[in-house]
Amino acid sequence: MTNAIEVRALRKTFGRATALDGLDLAVRSGEVHAFLGPNGAGKTTTIRILLGLLRKDGGEASLLGGDPWRDATALHTRLAYVPGDVTLWPGLTGGEIIDLLGSLRGSRSGLDPKRRQELIERFALDPAKKARAYSKGNRQKVALIAALASDAELLILDEPTAGLDPLMEAVFRECVDDERQRGRTVLLSSHILAEAEALADRVTIIRDGRTAETGTLAEMRHLTRTTVDAELAGPVVLDGLPGVHAAEVRGMHLHCEVDPAALNDVLTRLTAAGVVALTSRPPTLEELFLRHYSAERAGPGATP
Amino acid sequence: MTASALAGTPLANTGALARLAFRRDRIMLPAWVYVITAAIASNSYSLNKLYPSAAARADLAASGGRNPALVFLYGRLWGDSLGAVSAWRYGVWAAIFAALMSVFLVVRHTRADEEAGRLELVGSAAVGRLAALTAGLLVALAANMVLAVLLVVVLVVLGLPVAGSVAFALAITTCGVAFAAVAALAAQLAAGARAARGIAIGVLGAAYLLRAVGDASGAGGVSWLTWLSPLGWTELTRPYTSDRWWVLALPLALTAAATAGAYVLAVLRDHGAGLLPDRPGAAAASAWLRSSFGLAWRLQRGTLYGWAAGFAFTFAASGAAAKGIGSLLGGSSQLRNAFTRLGGQAGITDAYLAAIMSLAGLAAAAYATSAVLRLRAEETGGQAEPLLATAIGRTRWGLSHIAVAVAGTAILLAVAGVAAGLGYGLRTGSAGPEVARLLGAGLAQLPASLAVAGAAVVLFGLAPRASVAGAWTVVGVLVLIALFGQVLRLSQPILDVSPFTHVPKLPGAAVTVHTTGAPLLWLSLVVVALVATGLAGLHRRDIG
């Protein structure tokens, strides 16, 4: 399996500020890869380097087998990009901008008109309106339609749903699923965790310009705790059991977080006490995230 | 204005917005005020040195004050005191710069902020709906008041009479304030900052033209046109000669009327909207729009149409004024002899027409600079990013706007030549030959105008952050050299810096390969080298 995007030890500084400090990122061909991090972590800087808009200061970056800086225009015929902050030409209509971006992108002529029309209807966009009259969400739709209607093999989407309402967000998810079916590669930068959770095959989490973690969600869950809520028939004692965190007992109700290695022991004790009701769920990405950044805040060694 | 007294009113937090505006303009604003003050002070000082005696100034008044081309440029001269000569030479132009300062200030803090969405953020705080407009006007008013005080101090220190200096300073700054109000009105009419500035500067251009034609038409002509122009009022105040204070009521009345109009419209319209609602456009792009050149043309064509209309009007009028030149000289046998020695009737007319064409070149250079700087606006505005993420290379993107700048500049200079040729030719009954002659003279300016745009390309490629200020500084310096270089007796090496110094003085000068072809050829090569340097820089740097 080849990688559509391969980034190693990428560095970029702006004056004295370090934006990227040894970032690694590998996006396999045909996967939807979520690129997660809080604001200012370096997601957009990474994407701009991949697009050849910024020059890297160190490390390696390859995109579709080429050099993103040197081969920029050749590579751009094979990708479509939706910026995080979509600004359009105020005097042009949405339809005009969709066609313009489509024509400028392709070696092939323009966009498939049927697909363009279908997407405009799906996203409920009025293509005859001037861009200055569009809301943020509508501007986002213009850029999304222009990208999704293209036949690019790689889609780079920088926080694409920031301005969309929940209905349109659902449409967007359907569309990304369609793209996955067609075998297109998607790099989806986001700080909306539910989005990554719903869409991504693999995830890279970055923090302060460095890769904090990368892998499938299943792999990451392996490293993390399961949340357990149980109604019990009798009292249970979990004290002294390694791998149990944030245990809280209220009457017959137990809430705790359990390391994967300790799950078996915990469940043995619970069944011994008698289980009335039990829910256990894998951690949400939100919790993964919180753990990563709260660990940073609390200082090294605070959480194993 | 305290926040408490105005809280909850449409003016709530005007003071906070005004302070924010001063903070944002802490460099630009003093720079404008300083440049205007310093230009007047240094020029008055050097006029004093150049023409120390009353007799020398009387000579200047007799020659320069009656030269229709100079009258067209600067206005009429009302006396021969040092103050009167200073006011003649720099009054109208200082008023133009004060007006420009006010227009940029007001639009920047009203419509530009609204368009960028910043006012929405501010407006959601406890800020009244008229606060931004009021703050913009207050900042412009304050800037003009500071300018007035500084001018009076500097002029009095230079030894000029106090009353005249006050009249001179107010004649300049009331014009600035009037254009602040005009800009405030334009910012309500237009939905975009660019268009708002365009309207206000268009009014300024029309004001200059009315004054210039009114002044140059001479006694018995249409000299009443000057009374219709805010720039004419600056001149008609006649500082240091008769200090006609009542004339200053005219700019103040215009200020009051335009401000009232702006407030009425501001109350009536929606946030973000202009007076005219947007009509729906095409749902699909035409074949023409589907390339980077098509896009650049589409983005810039409206501005070019505006400039072309202004050029046609201005140069038709200037050309028509050329015919009056000979008769104006009729009164002075001494002058007539001087000009006959210089080359006869055709000589003076051609000298005037050549000066007009040289002005066309300068104005076209300003257009070309603004067209090139559109690249920077697209970059900082974020529109360049999705474009450069397509198969459009940086060079092609840069060239698309540069091509519009080149074509637009050529069109403007052709319009100037044809309009002046028609204006002059129709009055003298030789339209055909005059149009051909002046079209050539106009297009001869093209390499020099484009060299100025080339400097903007270099700055955009190599020093993008400084490109806007830098490119306009270049234009400003060249305007100063062209308008005042001879008067200030600048040394030849300084004059040689300006590409316009090297343009053959057409019409009039002999057209040969050596005197006409050679300078135009090497100026063209300079343009190509500048553009190539700028594009090479663009290729190497970060975008954004």
Image: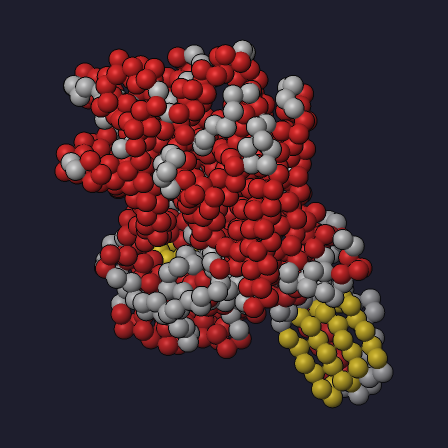
Q: Position of residue B191 (x, y in %)?
A: 47, 60
Q: Is residue B104 above or below residue A136?
A: above
Q: Is residue B296 above or below residue A113?
A: above
Q: Quadrant of residue B101?
A: top right
Is residue B270 among what the camera can see?
yes
Is residue B40 among what the camera can see?
no
Using residue A17 as the reference point, say whether residue B338 is left or right of it.
Answer: left
Between B176 and B121, the one nearer to me in the picture:
B176
Between A270 and B115, the one nearer to me in the picture:
B115
Q: Position of residue B473 (x, y in %)?
A: 48, 30
Q: Quadrant of the N terminus of chain A?
A: bottom left
Q: Quadrant of the C terminus of chain A?
A: bottom right
Using residue A252 as the reference point, say whether residue B268 is left or right of it.
Answer: left
Name which residue lies at 18% across and 31% down. Answer: B437
Q: Position of residue B79 (x, y in %)?
A: 52, 24
Using residue B416 as the reference point, say whether residue B11 is left or right of it.
Answer: right
